[in-house]
Image (cartoon, rainbow, N blue to C red):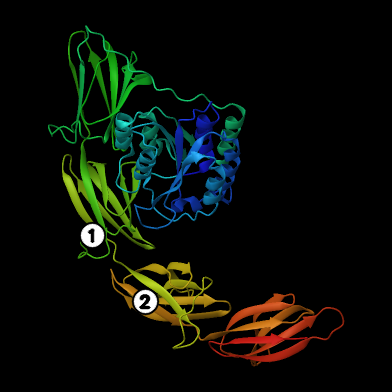
Amino acid sequence: MRVLAVAMFAISCLFMAPAQAAEQSIIVLDASGSMWGQIGGKAKMEIARETLSAVLQSVPADSALGLMVYGHRDKGSCDDIELAIPPAVGTADKIRAFVKGINPKGKTPLSQAVREAAEALKYTEEKATVILVTDGLETCEADPCALANELEKNGVDFTAHVVGFGLTKEEGKQVACLAENTGGKYLQASDAKQLAEALKQTVVAAPKPVEKPAPAPAPAAVPQFNVIATSTLSEGGPPLGKDNNDVQWLFYKADASGQAEGDYLDNQYVGTYSTTLEPGSYVAQATLNNSIKKLAPFEVKPGVITKVAVNFDAAHLTVLPKRTPQDKKADDNARVDVAFGDYATTFYGTTKAYVAAGDVKLTGSLGAVTVEKTVAAKAGEKIETDLVIGAGMVVNRATYVAGGPPMESSEIFFEVVSPTMDINGARKSFNSTYGTGTTLEAPAGDLILTARLGSTRAEIPFSIKAGERKDVTINIQAGVLAVAAPDSDRIVVFDAKKDIQGNQKEISYGFGPEHKDTLPAGDYVVKLTFKGDKAPEDRPVTIKAGERSEMKVD
């Protein structure tokens, strides 16, 4: 989902027009991890919450509205889809409250979410409308275009509107078909200004609902079709038949120079396509999986069936990203970037894609662990290849004292670094996170896990193998100092030891009457300065590992 603000344009299209009591709608809201991305310094999720809250105030009181959310509970699951609010009248406050508590984190199973929303609306029995709001493309091996054809075919009167934010024109085509194939609208915005403008449009002048054109009856004297368009992956190879919906056909009128002109006349997703066109010059544009595009000019003559053939010169690629060569299944958390020519796209887990013949660059990532591989693709072949990333998974744990109870803290900072230092004394960082019990992807080999909490820093060396999940516990050998001095304006903690010049090392400080810090076990001096004429004070304190020391100064 890229941002809900634009969604309001689609929602307004539905709800600011005269409502019919029998009609029901569901907003399908993308809550995948990318919603933490920012626009103008503000998280997209925050923009979504604020915008939805405002727009819901304009929804007619008799409109039946529901909310479907995905990607908000599980980081790596394609089944993380929830009908949060069933469609009903008067749900605005419930939707507003639910969206307020969303914590984006997961994948983008947008096709399955739209399907479940349609089923919740009983689309095969009643009129149903779904508004999909997405800031990303499908990541769960589903085809939104094929789904649109299915819902349109089986629905009584089904419509899907799609809202995308920040998608390129090519990316937009991969989800726009959900709207186009069901008679809905695809709306796109590229920045915060366009989001604001879309909201103005919904308030000032709501567009009329999209009406699906009635199919024109075929003239009795005209044959069933006079154009047959076929596509193949290689010259002379088997056609991509009627059951293959990875091919998009667009037919245009041709100008005097043989180039496509004007709007397209027809749009279908199918490998082999038959249609009827009036005599004249045309251009067929065939696109395979939104990545490989071919143009085929042709001429339609009276009484003749014209055959249009397109060879994509492509292969079908399956990539299994793994941690080790011995793994039987792909790792769903692995990111796979596929690039060929000037096209690039991203998948997670098992990757299936059509690629142009030639060199295909694969990049696999698990956290900061990255590998690259080049595959030579030949037209017409099916390629299956493993992409071994070679990462392990570190489970971060810590204690205040050796043998003590596990620490439970979301403030401790863990980082996996290299055991060697560069010429400047810095270690290479591979991954980092906050909180005990969290996990970090790490390259196989000898590494160091560091932990930082307050003024305490500790580290522990460890070794990990590719595919291994390993608990690593750091003893930070520290305690907590809490100082309360009601009249103080500054509290400074120094190391009790003095250097050869008689100076003490400043450890931490705070302004005001209170200061708390996590300190390595040892002896310290707390220097207090006070408001008014009260003289400064120095107070010694000893910090013991695993204990809390409280200093109260009257």
Left or right, 307 with reference to 79: left
Residue 438 lies, in percent from the top left, at 43, 69
Can the viewer see residue 163 in this picture? no
Which residue sits at x=28%, y=23%?
Answer: 284
Can see residue 283? yes
Q: Disc number at residue 15?
A: none
Classify mark 2: residues with Cα within 10 Å, few (<14), some (14-19) or many (20+).
few
Which amino acid, by three-letter code, is at mark 1? Lys
* Place of residue 475 in the rendered image (x, y in percent of width and height, measured from the top left): 46, 84
Quadrant location, the C terminus: bottom right
Q: Which of 260/410 is in front? A: 410
Task: Compare marks 1 and 2 and give the one earlier in the sequence.
Answer: 1
- Disc 1 designates what residue? 329
Which element type, helix, strand or loop, lies under badge 2? strand
Q: In this rendering, would 546 be left or right of 431?
A: right
Say above or below: 1 vs 534. Answer: above
432 left or right of 283 in image:
right
Question: Three-letter amino acid code at disc 2?
Answer: Asp
Residue 428: x, y in percent? 43, 70
Taking 314 as reference, is 376 above or below it? Answer: below
Judging from the image, what secondary structure is the residue with disc 1 in? loop
Residue 117 vs residue 521, the one in the foreground: 117
Depth check: 240 or 209 in front? 209
At 26% from the left edge and 9% from the top edge, which residue is drawn?
219
Name the residue that disc number 2 marks.
471
Circle 1: is it few (<14), some (14-19), or many (20+) Cα within 10 Å? Answer: few
What is the spatial separation of the Cα atoms under label 1 and label 2, in whole angstroms? 23 Å
Q: Position of residue 135 (x, y in %)?
A: 45, 44
- Whether tag 1 and tag 2 are in contact, CB under 8 A, the answer is no
In this view, which residue lies farthest toward the top?
221
| Pick the front one: 449 or 1 | 1
